[in-house]
Image (cartoon, rainbow, N blue to C red):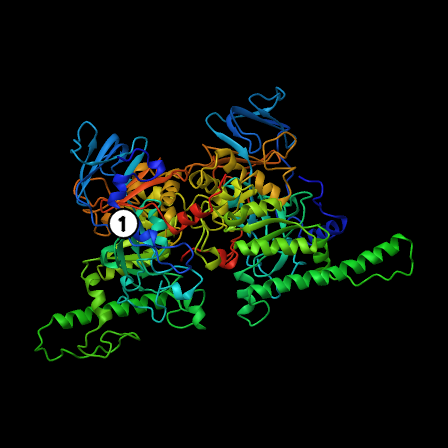
Amino acid sequence: MSASIPRITPATAIAVVFVLSVIAPGAVSAQSSTAPVDLVIKNATVMTASHGTIQHGSVWLHNGKIAGVGATVSAPAGATVVDATGKYVTPGVIDPHSHSALGDDVNEATSPVTPSMMMIDAFDNRDKALYQALAGGVTSELLLHGSANMIGGQAVVIKNKFGLSKEEMLFPNAPRSIKFASGENPKRVYGTRNQLPSTRMGNFEVMRQAFEDAKVYRKEWDDYNARIAKGDKDARMPHRDLKLEALADILRGKLLVQIHCYRADEFLTEEAIAQEYGFKIRAFHHALEMYKVGGKIAADGTGIATFTDWYGGKYEMWDGIPWNAVMSMREGVRVALKSDSNDHIRRLNQEAGKMVHYGGATEDEAIAMITLNPAWIMGIDDNTGSLDAGKDGDVVIWNMDPLSTYARAEKVYIDGDLFFDSSLPGFGTTHFSGVMHGSGFGAGEDDDEDQGEN
Amino acid sequence: MLRNLFLGRSASVRRLVIAGSLISGLVGVAGVMAQAPMVDITPAPGTIAITGGKLLTITHGVIENGVVLIEGGKITAVGTAASVKVPKGATIVDAKGMTVYPGLIDAETRIGLQEIASDRTTNDTVEPSDEILPQMHVYDAFHSESEHIPITRFNGITNAIVAPASTDTIPGQDSFIQLAGRDRDTMLMVRDVALAMNFGEAPKRGGRGEGAAAGGARYPSTRMGEISQMRQALLDAQEYMARRSRPAAGGEEGAAPAASGGRGGAGGAGGSAFSLRNEALIPYLKGEKPVVLGAYDGHDVETAMEFAKEFHLKVILSHVTKAQDVLDKIASYHVPVIVGPIFDMPEANERYDAVYRIPGELQKRGVKVILASYNVSNSRNLPYSAGFAVAYGMPYDEAMKSITLNPAEAFGMGDKLGSLDVGKIANVVIANGDPLDVRTNVKQVYINGVAIPMETRQTRLRDEYWPKK
């Protein structure tokens, strides 16, 4: 990961602590790690996501981190050994576009610019969707605001330690991400109320105006801080506005910008606006037409988080083709697959398998699309996303090649600790023994991204 | 001779599909509105021999290095290379290393009723103006040029039961579709194949049901209302039927029933007036055709089955994804069951695989299990539903049956479709591996013995933009 990616700043850390402090203590049993000091998974087909596949390989976890990966590892004699003969091992699956565990609080659809919305405020750590994703091998998720607003809210990055407390499920020191949208959704939401924006012109005008306002705000604060730094005791602190502060942080490059966007022309407009205001776009989400302009977008360093084979839900999805991911990858775009759905998050490994079918991705490339590449999109690829020494012990043992239709996650480790074991009775969870919450009606979906019937 | 299925069709196969290719060549990619090229499925003279493949016959096991002969749109021989003689002059399709199986059948889709989900003008999925509408016929709306059709058959699905959406208690009658044909009528294998009936949450007016959009609760807004209204409708139809079969001289003949249960009641305009609604129900009240009862929860399944018993309906159960508590009872009904979507979410505090396991659990109890997509653009993923059923306990052969022979039999087409057997319609698929695996590519689809161009709106976009490196 590049050094320029911001981590949580002291100011936001304070905000996060404040949020956490209002959570009722003991709401969920807050157990500390039960991970063994040393754990070795042996005799497996190890798909590393970063450096190929190792037959009859081993993965050694020490104090929750990956300590060694290879044909042999130098774990101490007393290590706990898991014999994975005939099984496959991958990094934990990472979903860079989820609305799970947010109830029906996905969209603050009352204004097209709402960057001060913090998704952590809606996060329900007992939502069954987290458990169902865990059973599908998902160890980290980016929980995003919906697509009603051109500039939505700030995401929460979780480790899927189902059964632990809300604060223990937060990904430590993960960069901040913010959700933008474009196209049909914002113009539909506001247009049907006869408000701005009701066209794509309106969409981008709203966005540009927001950044113009943010430039003024940033300058006020920059000037103030410069005077304070010079010891000017007469400097008067400007008004603090949460919305403008968040926008200014985008201009300062402190947020990873994640943009819901389907059409090729809109990728180009978004990149031009980003360039004009001096920020980078981390990834286009959905991005069904990236195959048309992949080369250009690859040059901008923007990745994509895409569906495999969804199309037809609306006009901007009409040119979606299942070869998009592989074609974009061949053009140099960093490609991740994502769920945007409480259903598909349970089977992202099979979605990756489709990439072998549609365009001929190698199995290693397909695995990277649900592990290392989404980790990069979320800015956590220094910590997780591949089986490399020094990374977090986020590991899945599968009954067979995870790209097969018949694959099932058997054991899921997060930070070296076992959180799911399908051989256990009941839920198969190791840290959860309470009562799960339903996801709510239509939850986990971002309104019309759901193309399902019934 | 078609030597390499990976590289496309050889001249000899192209000859068979020349009509389709010519038409498709005229259609550009740019248009947004759907007009997929039609494909003539009139078989050319001569024999096609698919040789060397692994045959999944469905009815009589797996045949390695098998041969399928096709002539006049029908399967004329199936067997090992040693046992089937390939006639001279046959077009030989080399399927060495390939898997050959009957075309898949999606037992419930909305293909042809919806093009773009968000655009109402391209949606004819259900008529929401009334609740009891057996006189609605899917074939009146079925859009045979839908772009979803080539995209679906591209993955080996050759037939579909197209049903109206489930937001009316009785939304209309399903059609059995051949997913290729020169025109709509060729594609309609059975116009009215079954009657859709829905129970529980979806058809309610008011609350969460579709009717809520119409503003406020109206009848029927509860399960009681649904059943009462349906019961009245079927009683009215029975009365209508009895009156029509009685000799014309009868004194009471022609009198309108007292209570008709609302709009479109028994006689409509009263008396002996011809009633489209009642007429539509007659074959189902006589048990001549099946009703598809849609119910998710165990108690709704029980209610639906009691209702069906009351009127002696011939039943196919559908959904049952929240009915884990009554699996034994479902088995005791001895009716075919369409399970799904298998990707329905388990409830809170259920095990993660509670729904994935239902097909296998029902099959184990002797139920004829069918899987369906219940979708439009996702219909192409039907084989993966069967794959999930296998991953969670269903034997592979039974899972293949659930998307081939079982739906064919349940909808009265078992003698024509669903297996590689002599005399059946030659809907045959050649793929480069296990059809249920997400990594497998379908290489060639035959419908009515005609090689269908493996081309869709999506392949044309793919080919136009494929990276040139």
Q: Amino acid at mark 1?
A: Pro
Mark 1: give few (<14), some (14-19) or many (20+) Cα within 10 Å.
Answer: many
Nearer to me, B40 or B214:
B40
Which quadrant of the view contains residue A405?
top left
Q: Is residue B318 positioned above or below B219 on the image?
A: above
In this picture, residue B321 sits left or right of residue B195:
right
Residue position marked by numbered label 1 in the rendering: B336
In this picture, residue A319 sits left or right of residue B315:
right
Q: Is residue A32 positioned above or below A304 on the image?
A: above
The C terminus of chain A, quarter of image: bottom left
Residue B123 in the image: x percent, y percent?
Answer: 38, 63
What residue sits 36% from the left and 52% below the top? B320
Q: Is residue B378 positioned above or below A81 on the image?
A: below
What residue sits 62% from the left and 37% below the top? A384
Residue A425 in the image: x percent, y percent?
Answer: 47, 38
Residue A71 in the image: x percent, y percent?
Answer: 55, 22
Nearer to me, A235 or B285:
A235
Which quadrant of the view contains residue B430?
top left
